[in-house]
Each structure stands twice: as structure tokens, then as C-alpha cells.
Image (spheres, grey):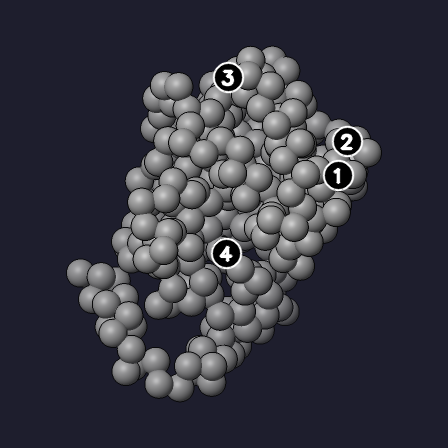
């Protein structure tokens, strides 16, 4: 059984549904999945929509109700506007899922392009989590050789997390260092776990914003992660691999209606391109752009 966790409130239930659909669409025939949805207030209507995704491939889906009183301390942390309190739910997974020893955690702004069996079978050895290096590490020299991972895709050793009371350490760190934490749960995980982290190959979390800005230029990302505030579901968002997102969206109850398709399939990418050129009029003079072109067609 491949255990998968996604965290969302009602506003993000559609995006959680897209992640789920992408996993079921690309699963191997013999893959069996159990989805644990950390429920920060998902409406019954949207729960039914998520449950309907079993029609793509049979699976188990369990909604875990969240007591937000347990996350009050994290509300004091100032971070990006697009991060909600639901981002911190993963910091109590060991407590929320006492009978689960290992799990894959995925953010709602990801889509999966392959079976997750290899990822789930990652040998964690003595590590608490496994993840891919964050974009900040990839592109800044001062972060070189730093084991700082992106928290949007994690393989988590929940048994070891519980045994070593790591979630208490998360709490204490957030309580005592709110001014240090800049990227929410991600900083907390990295600063507490430090060297007890296993690094995964880049293709398991290709962090992407626009065409130039990708942590890997592979044409075949196993997981696409739409980082930053330019999410693919925003009209005119300047983000790459947007078409992949809408291909999965078509499999869900949130698929665009016929009268919306011209706007989203034709006008949306056109407007995105214009926005990209407007913000970066000299993009073709940048070596990074031509490097991206080279690896994208290689």
C-alpha cells in the first residue's frame, strides 16, 4: 500500500483533487493507494468530488479532521501570503496518523506524472524525511552543499518521527524562533532535522515558475511543483508546464465547462506569454534562457 497525504482547506480542495487524479492516472496497474486528506474544513460537496476520483483507479481515501487549536503557535509566523495554516498540518502527521509508519506528503500545487511506488519505497535508513533540494539551494552559491529541501514533496518516516518526539521539537522551534522562520513549515522541518535528511533526485520535485526558472530542465519530470504565487489555476499566470495541469484537471469534477475552454485553453496561454515578455523584455539575452531552451529540446 502506498500511503499518500495531502493537506487542504475547502478553498484548496479542487487542487488536492487534481493531485489525486494525477496520481491515479499515472499509477501502475498493481499500485494500491491510501490517500489521507488532512481536512481543514472541506465541504461535504467537495469531499464527494474527491471521493468520485476513485473512478479513475480504485483506492482508499480517508479524511482526517483537524483541530486548528493545535496549530495556534504557527499562526504567529509571518510568511508568504499563499501559505495557509493548512501548510503546517504536516508538522503533526505522526500524531494525526498514529497507525501509519511511512507516507508520501504532497503539496496541493503539484502534479504527478509517474507511479509513486519507487518514491514510496525509498530507503530512508536513519533519516526522518527524504526530499529534493529547494530552489534556493540550487541557484544560490551561498547555499552550496546545504541539505535544505523543499517541503512540497516528502517521504516521511513517521515511526521514527514519533519515536524521537520530533513533532515536539517542531513546536518548540516555532515557539522560540518565529522571527527566523521565513518559509513556514519548510524552514521548521529543515532547521530541526538538519543532517537527518535524505536527498532525492531532482526529477521527484521539479520546482517551476516560468520557462527559465526550473530546478531541473528535464523534459520528463516525475513530479511538477508549481512554486511561488504564479499558480496554473490563476488566469494569465506566468508558469511552465501549465498545459500538464489542465490535462489532469479535465479528469476531475472541476473540469472547465465548454463555455470556459476558449478562455482557459486559448486566451490563458497567450496572455501568459505576453506577461512573460512584458516582465522580461530582454529574456533572449540571458544565458539562462538559452540553457533552458537547450535542455528542453535535447
Q: Which residue is mark 2?
A: 70
| Quadrant holding the C terminus | bottom left
Q: Residue farthest to the front?
A: 176
Q: Nearer the viewer, residue 220 or 162?
A: 162
Secondary structure type for disc 1: helix
- How dense is the environment of label 3, judged by Cα within 10 Å: few (below 14), some, or many (20 and up)? some
Q: Which residue is mark 4?
A: 227
> Which residue is pictured at 77% across the width and 31% down the height?
70
Q: Residue farthest to the left?
A: 298
Q: Are marks 2 and 4 in contact (CB under 8 Å)?
A: no
Q: Can you tell which mark lies on residue 73?
A: 1
> Which residue is pictured at 71% across the width and 41% down the height?
74
Q: Nearer the viewer, residue 107 or 195?
A: 195
- For the residues carrying marks 2 and 4, which lies nearer the camera in this image? 2
Q: Are marks 1 and 3 in contact (CB under 8 Å)?
A: no
Q: Which residue is mark 3?
A: 160
Name the image quarter holding residue 118. top left
Amino acid at each position: 500500500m502506498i500511503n499518500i497525504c495531502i493537506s487542504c482547506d475547502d478553498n484548496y480542495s479542487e487542487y488536492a483533487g487534481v493531485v489525486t487524479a494525477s496520481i491515479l492516472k499515472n499509477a501502475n496497474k498493481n499500485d494500491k493507494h491510501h490517500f489521507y486528506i488532512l481536512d481543514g474544513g472541506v465541504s461535504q460537496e467537495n469531499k464527494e468530488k474527491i471521493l468520485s476520483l476513485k473512478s479513475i483507479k480504485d483506492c482508499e481515501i480517508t479524511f482526517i479532521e483537524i483541530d486548528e487549536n493545535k496549530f495556534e503557535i504557527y499562526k504567529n509566523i509571518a510568511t508568504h501570503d499563499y501559505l495557509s495554516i493548512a501548510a503546517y498540518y504536516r508538522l503533526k502527521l505522526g500524531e494525526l496518523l498514529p497507525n501509519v509508519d511511512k507516507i508520501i506528503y504532497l503539496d496541493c500545487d503539484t502534479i504527478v506524472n509517474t507511479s509513486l511506488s519507487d518514491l514510496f519505497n525509498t530507503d530512508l535508513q536513519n533519516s526522518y524525511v527524504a526530499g529534493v533540494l529547494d530552489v534556493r539551494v540550487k541557484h544560490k552559491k551561498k547555499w552550496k552543499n546545504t541539505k535544505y529541501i523543499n517541503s512540497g514533496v516528502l517521504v516521511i518516516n513517521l515511526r521514527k518521527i514519533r519515536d524521537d518526539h520530533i513533532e515536539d521539537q517542531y513546536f518548540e522551534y516555532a515557539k522560540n524562533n518565529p522571527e527566523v522562520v521565513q518559509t513556514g513549515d519548510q524552514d521548521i522541518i529543515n532547521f530541526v532535522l538538519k543532517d537527518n535528511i535524505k536527498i532525492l533526485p531532482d526529477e521527484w520535485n521539479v520546482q517551476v515558475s516560468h520557462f527559465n526558472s526550473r530546478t531541473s530542465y528535464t523534459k520528463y519530470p516525475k513530479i511538477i511543483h508549481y512554486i511561488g504565487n504564479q499558480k496554473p489555476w490563476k488566469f494569465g499566470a506566468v508558469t511552465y508546464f501549465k498545459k500538464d495541469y489542465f490535462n489532469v484537471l479535465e479528469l476531475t469534477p472541476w473540469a472547465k465547462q465548454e463555455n470556459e475552454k476558449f478562455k482557459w485553453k486559448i486566451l490563458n496561454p497567450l496572455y501568459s506569454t505576453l506577461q512573460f515578455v512584458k516582465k522580461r523584455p530582454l529574456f533572449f539575452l540571458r544565458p539562462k534562457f538559452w540553457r533552458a531552451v537547450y535542455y528542453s529540446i535535447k
